Image (spheres, rainbow, N blue to C red):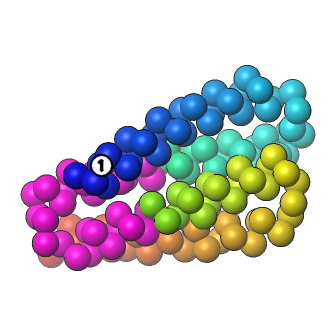
Amino acid sequence: MAFAIWGGVFAFLAVALGAFGAHVLGDKLSAEMMSVYHTGDQYQMYHALALIAVGILLRLHPDSRLMSAAGWLFAVGIVLFSGSLYALSVSGVKVLGAITPIGGLCFLAGWICFILALAR
């Protein structure tokens, strides 16, 4: 259930960060950087929900290494992908964008593991 709990934490943070972005950063960031921030928030929520699903599915199949791998990849992906987009949008430091694709690859690998775990 640890993945489901982390999914809940990440979902809570996605809502809080989304509200922060809309109400505090909306007037401070350019439209482009606000879009970057919003993308990070969206992907965080999507993958928080995926983590909740992983946690529930692991209760049914606790020995699934692929499902566990999916959970880890989703969690790392949130930190790297969404975290780098939040940092980029707020700081404007473009080099942070180099981290984003690594997080995206974690998401993709996570979905592959998720699919393969379900196909077994």
Q: Is residue 110 visible?
A: yes
Which secondary structure type mostly characterizes the magenta part of the structure? helix
Q: Which residue is mark 1?
A: 4
Taking depth in this image into account, of 98 and 118 the one nearest to the observer is 98
The residue that appears at 19% across and 56% down in the rendered structure is: 57
The residue that appears at 87% across and 27% down in the rendered structure is: 27
Q: Is residue 61 magenta?
A: yes
Q: Quadrant of residue 84?
A: bottom right
The residue that appears at 55% across and 74% down in the rendered structure is: 105
Give the position of the C terminus as an image quadrant.
bottom left
Where does the image place residue 47, in percent across and percent down from the top left?
45, 53
Number of marks: 1
> What is the secondary structure assignment of the residue under circle 1?
helix
Q: Is residue 49 visible?
A: no
Q: In the rendered structure, which amino acid carries the disc numbered 1?
A: Ala
Q: How many neighbours does mark 1 have within 10 angstroms: few (below 14), some (14-19), or many (20 or more)? A: many
Q: Quadrant of residue 3?
A: bottom left
The residue that appears at 10% across and 57% down in the rendered structure is: 60
Where does the image place residue 97, in percent across and percent down from the top left?
77, 65
